[in-house]
Every structure is written in structure tokens, then in C-alpha cells.
Amino acid sequence: MTVGVLALQGDVREHINLIDSLGFTSISVKTKNDLDRADALVIPGGESTAISKLLVAFELMESVRQFVRNKPVLGTCAGLILLSDEVDGKLPDQELIGGLPIRVSRNAYGGQTHSFEAEIEISGERENVAFIRAPRILDSGPTRVLATLDGDPVAIQHGKIFGASFHPELTGAKVLHRLFLDAI
Ligand code: GLN
């Protein structure tokens, strides 16, 4: 099984390393051909406005939307924003991929200088994860909450779609990726 990492912008390398360390085969996805080779997709953190523009410019937006309807996808931070159906603070021309019936607020955990690490419990394990200009999940809708921080959901699952406000890949946290890859 091949796990693609959308490689238009953001922390692609860290996700690839994490996927490889869990014993799966990974590829960077930059084209429709790459996407066709992937059985699952990770949309990394970075900048959701830039990733959105590049998806449109490289004519990948529709293919990724179709992928999300059919195959397993994990979005972290900017990836979570792009997968959300409703985004507060979205730029007017920012297109979303959608697929998660949730509402998030961009940058709601504060700007770059307010970045922080926090310990969360996920699937019975405690891990340190990084919040960097992270989106807050204002309404998790019908999704399954996998982890919370101070009572707010920070990781969710909706069928084959997984999402997290934080970056697990920057602190070497493996549980979310393991849950995602085990579910495939
Ligand atoms: N706030 C960023 C955005 O809107 C996401 C930050 C991140 O991915 N670390 O895309």
C-alpha cells in the first residue's frame, strides 16, 4: 500500500519520514499521476491559502476532492482547514477541498509567536504535539472526537477522513498516523 503526501507546500518531509518509520511506503504527490498511485493521502500543515492556490493552479483540486470522497485522507493543521466544510477566517478567494462536516477557525490558537507544544491523550496514549497557528475546531458536527485539549476537540475522524489541529510529525508523535494507517 502506498501513502501519498500532498507535496505542494508545507512540512512534507516530516510526514514522509513518519510514514516510513511506521513501515509504510510513501510518495510525494505533486501531479494527478502521483495521486493515482496513492491508496491514501496525507495533507500536511503549512499554509492553507498557499496550498489551496497551488491545488487550483496545478489543476489538482477536483482530483483531490474526488480522492477524498473515495479513499482515506489525513489532514493536519492547514490540511484540516482545507478538508473542513466551513472555515472562519477563510480568504474570500480561498477554495476548500471539503469533506469534513465541521467548522474550524483559522489561526484561533494564536499567531506564530504563540506556537506551543501540549500533551494530548489519543487512543489511550499520551503524546506531545505542536500547535502552530493552529485552527480551532468550533463544531465537530457528527465526527468522532479522537483527542481534546482543554475540552476542545483537536483530532477527529469521520469515516475514512482523519483530521487534527496540531502537527504530530514535528514532535515525532506517531499515534494519529498509526490510527490512520491501521484504519486503511
Ligand atoms: N494557519 C495556517 C493556515 O491557515 C495553518 C498553520 C499550520 O498548518 N501550521 O493555513
Image (cartoon, helix red, strand yellow):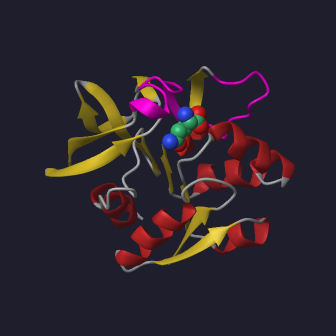
**Figure quadrant, ligand 1:** top right
**Observer able to see residue 41:** no
Within the magenta stretch, is there residue 52? Answer: no
Quadrant in the picture for the C terminus: bottom left
In percent of width and height, residue 105 lies at 51, 22
Residue at point 32%, 62% (across, down): 172
The answer to whether residue 59 is above or below residue 149 is below
Is 158 displayed left or right of 95 in the figure?
A: left
The residue nearer to you, when weighing 141 against 134, is: 134
Q: Looking at the image, how many numbered discs can be counted on the residues?
A: 0
Is 71 displayed left or right of 158 in the figure?
A: right
Is 44 displayed left or right of 153 in the figure?
A: right
**Observer able to see residue 7:** yes
Is 37 displayed left or right of 111 in the figure?
A: right
In percent of width and height, residue 90 lies at 65, 24
Residue at point 60%, 51% (across, down): 68
- Based on the displayed image, in which of its 4 quarters is residue 32 positioned? bottom right
Residue most extreme to the front: 113
Residue at point 68%, 35% (across, down): 96
Within the magenta stretch, is there residue 112? Answer: yes
**Magenta extent:** 90-114
In percent of width and height, residue 126 lies at 16, 50
Residue at point 41%, 26% (across, down): 109
In percent of width and height, residue 9 lies at 66, 54
The answer to whether residue 7 is above or below residue 68 is below
The answer to whether residue 96 is above or below residue 28 is above
Q: Main structural element of the magenta stretch: helix, strand or loop? A: loop
- Based on the displayed image, in which of its 4 quarters is residue 2 positioned? bottom right
